[in-house]
Image (cartoon, helix red, strand yellow):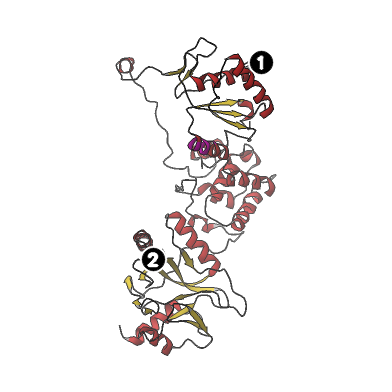
Amino acid sequence: METKSIVKKIRESFVIRDDAYAIQKNDGSYSCVKDSLTDEVINKHLKKEITIGAYQLDKSNNIKYICFDFDKDTKEDSEQAKKLFDSLKKEGYHPLLEDSGGGVYRRHVWLNIENMQSKDAREWAAGYCRKHEIEPSEFFPKQNSISEDGYGNFVKLPLSINKKTKKFCAILEGDIEHRDKIRYVSRIDENSVDNFSFFEWQTNVKQKQCESDQVLLYVLKNKIEKDCFRNNILFKNMAVLLVFSGLTPQRIIKIARIIVRNCPGTTLASFEGWLKKARSKEFTDFNKNELNAWIEKFNLPIKKYNNVENKELEIISIEDLLTSNIQPPEWLVEDILMKEGVTLIGGEAGCFKSFTGLHIMASLSEGDPVFGHFMCKKQKVLYIDEENGASTLKERLEKLKIGKCLKSPLQGGLSIFNEVKLDTYEGYERLDNAINKFKPDVIIVDSAVRVLTG
């Protein structure tokens, strides 16, 4: 390609404002040149006489490119860059993979695009990286907007040298013949939501994708009868869908307003309550079975979700069970507590349930028979107390030591009034962290009613 042609392509692909540019010094730093970015300047860049960077936002906050920067200079980082390049290419885009010249493995992935608002480009880039589990060091643009007399960030242009390392910044794959139009809706029109199907929703903490957003699309375009959302199935699942979509809170609220508008008798505050629960991870699963039952119950003209698991009952013969290699249960406390099992101690108030739990803990910590009768194996115990408190526990444990004639210290750990909730995602996560840290063999909880939200 002739020099003039390359200069033209560089200008078309990377230059959105020509009233200033950045120039690199020999130590790798840059200074702003408040002068015209002419073809002659670009030509000097290509001839390696100078190295320049192009400011990314014009005064209307439009951009021409997104640049993903992989700056850790590790082989793994360069592989991440290649993964991003291949993913973009597979989806029909025309990216560039550049050796950014800062080290052995440092890379830039460029996406030359039609004019787009910086804010929308940043949202798209962040969402794309989340979806494909790619972690660049950073990406440009780095700001949504610039002030009237501001410049914002720039990126060093390819096809010259890094002044500090003296290394040529070569394009490794791709070319600059193309500019892409990102498949993205930059604004939500509250009166026309036909474009909502562009979303590829991520519907749980593991970031698995839901193949369709047909229920959301229907709710955004149609009034819903009051009976259809009385049981909260709709709001709960729409909240999960939105919270784990990667959208900004502002956009989620815009969508929420449309949902509420089409659900007479509801309020934005009530839907925000469901959003709050989803954000706190009280629930995270987008339940297709639940929504399919909802669609069927009210005979709604919505296509049901596909690939819903509906496993048949697995039936084995009695003889298969009898001839299997299933081992007999292993008792930690004879006839009371089975290994990998759950034991529930129940009774009326004041019937010594807590004392029984503490006695079992003390017996397990020493390997002594429970109540002098039920044989047990020595185990490490975590005792979660949400019922009595430190003062009562201390008094009872002192009495237990005397009653069991224990002279050595009791082994085990105590969690006292830590507001443990075992039926919420956060509570489960806290317990999981405690288990990984303390590594107990047995967990005793006092009492069930205190650790459940229902």
The alpha-carbon separation of the residues under discs 2 and 1 comes to 68 Å
Q: Secondary structure at mark 1?
A: loop
Residue 432 in magenta stretch: yes
| Depth check, front residue: 336 or 134 | 336
| Label 2 with label 1: CB-CB less than 8 Å | no
Query: Observer-nearest residue: 193 or 211?
Result: 211
Q: Is residue 267 at all visible to an observer of this figure?
A: no
The amino acid type found where label 1 is placed reads: Glu
Q: Give percent across and percent down for residue 317.
A: 33, 17
Place of residue 149 in the rendered image (x, y in percent of width and height, measured from the top left): 61, 80
Q: Is residue 296 magenta?
A: no
Residue under the point 64% across and 42% down: 225
Q: Position of residue 80 (x, y in %)?
A: 37, 59
Q: Quadrant of residue 352?
A: top right
Residue pictured at 57% horizontal, 18% vertical = 359
Quadrant of the image containing the C terminus: top right
Whether residue 28 sits left or right of residue 316 in the image: it is: right
- Residue plotted at (50% across, 49% down): 213
Residue occupying image coordinates x 49% and y 30%? 440
Residue 88 in the image: above or below residue 439: below
**What type is the residue that disc 2 sits on?**
Tyr
Compared with residue 280, is residue 157 higher up or lower down, i.e. above or below?
below
Q: Residue furthest front?
A: 407
Q: Nearer the viewer, residue 113 or 428?
A: 428
Residue 106 falls in image quadrant: bottom left
Q: Which label number is shown at residue 142?
A: none
Q: Which SS type dominates the magenta stretch?
A: helix
Looking at the rendered structure, which numbered label has been put on residue 348? Answer: 1
**Residues in magenta, as a range:** 431-437
The answer to whether any part of residue 206 appears in the image is yes
Looking at the image, is mark 2 or mark 1 nearer the viewer? 1
Identify the disc placed on residue 93.
2
